[in-house]
Image (cartoon, rainbow, N blue to C red):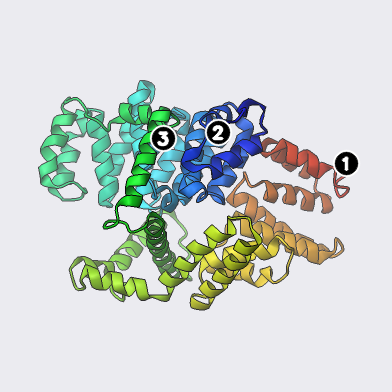
Amino acid sequence: MAYDSGKMETKELVESLEKDGLDLDLQVPKTLMARPDAVPLLKNTVEFNYDCGDGFAIIHAVHVLGAIKTPESFDALLYALVNRQEALGDWPVECMPSLLAGFGPPALPKLKQAASFRLLDEFARVDAMAAITAIAWRHPEAREECVEFLKLALENEDDPYVVGEAVNGLCELHETSALPAVTKAFDEKRTEFNQADQKEALETMAGKPIGAGGPQDDFQRAENYFTEENFRRLREISEESDEDGEAEEDSAESTKELYVSMALGLRESHDARREYFKGKTPESVSEIKREIEEFTEWYNSERKLKTVGLAPKEIEEGKISREEKEEREKNHPWSKAYGLIYEAIGLLNTDTAEGDHEGKALIEQALELDPDNEKALSIKADLLSSRQDRKALPLLDKLIELGEAGSHEYAMKAQFLVLDSGLQSRSKIREALGYAETACGMDSENFDAVILLAQIKYWLYDGSYKQLLEQARQIDAPRTENFMKNPWIRERNFR
């Protein structure tokens, strides 16, 4: 479909980016790259509409965010890295490290934080670490800081993939000062690489040219994503995937299986963390570090996976065949629930009355199978909240109790408390204040949370509402101006 994209509203362009998949008119992303005001809409794509356009919505979005080059677009890109690994995993986003690294040395503090956070998905950590390497490669002035971080990771990390990426980065940077530490990591078998890889790694460190797949190629791939040649390649891959009846009877079914698999992994991890850390309140950094290390050992060696009935270490030791493991997972209520949720999301995104009805029914079926399913609870709460239906409240409370509520859910809870207050009960409004502050603390770019907090502070005669209104304007100026037409907010003098 051809567009005169330069004359289109930013919202229309983002909608096209979300829905058109590999039929996207390439002028659309190129126009968006010149519009920083697209960032809040693209963040919404990453948060809520990531699986549109045959799963390409989020992949298109992260490449546009990587090209806009503002602090807000970096934060949205980092959100995708941390929270959307399962969606990005549907197709190989080889360029994520270079997209992050494209923001240069100013991005290092947040990238180092992500790479160091041990409870984060290991592949997200690896991407963050690869981005640090890419910054060192492109920005010589930041090399020393990056190398120091990679060396510390090599010495202190125990995840083989993270250690492997530290080895990979130091070797690509030809950092010969790290030779003893790299050799030690191989000798101690702490890296994902085997001993056969050691020779090549050390040759690269000594100055052997990097082959395909190095930072320079990653940057080039990111820059060439929105090209006819690349989209033609992606279409061919998609068609081959559809035609390969033995490997994948159906690409949608394969994507569904991947979604269920990733969801199960996250669910096991979240459940384990709640179980292990319940009632524990470490008071120092050293205590936190010790608790995390002990949790990791307990999770791998002792805790039985709910879906399989064995600990990860027992599975690795071969106490169950791969076929039996897959069969147990497939028949577990969690798997069936996540499969229904996947189908429901597709139906709800059709924007039709029939799709809406069938999608809601599937969400109900998922909750019957798995009453604590965080995804189903969140979707149902969102659907009810959109109609200001108070039946959403117990669902929101349950998400908060489970520790699965995000900024969006806390903001919805605050909104209901405001409605309950009738603008008369100050205790209700103050209770809403706490939830709204939590929502903003979790995501300072959540417009709904920020504008709601501004409104609540206004009602409580707190002059800081003005700073929050300015913050809301920075996120989405048009929505803020529309909100200000509402008679609730008027200028006040505060003593």
| Residue to which mark 1 is pinned | 491
- Amino acid type, mark 2: Pro
Up/down of 68 relative to 463, above or below: above
Among the two numbered marks 1 and 3 on one chain, the one whose residue lies closer to the N terminus: 3
* Disc on res. 71: 2
Residue depicted at x 27% and y 71%: 325
Residue depicted at x 42% and y 45%: 114
- The foreground one among 120 and 224 is 224
**Left or right: 131, with 168 as reference point:** right
Q: Secondary structure at mark 1?
A: loop
Up/down of 216 relative to 360, above or below: above
| Residue to which mark 3 is pinned | 231
Q: Secondary structure at mark 2?
A: helix
State the residue lying farthest toward the top. Answer: 140
Q: Marks 3 and 2: which is nearer the front?
A: 3
Among the two numbered marks 3 and 2 on one chain, the one whose residue lies closer to the N terminus: 2
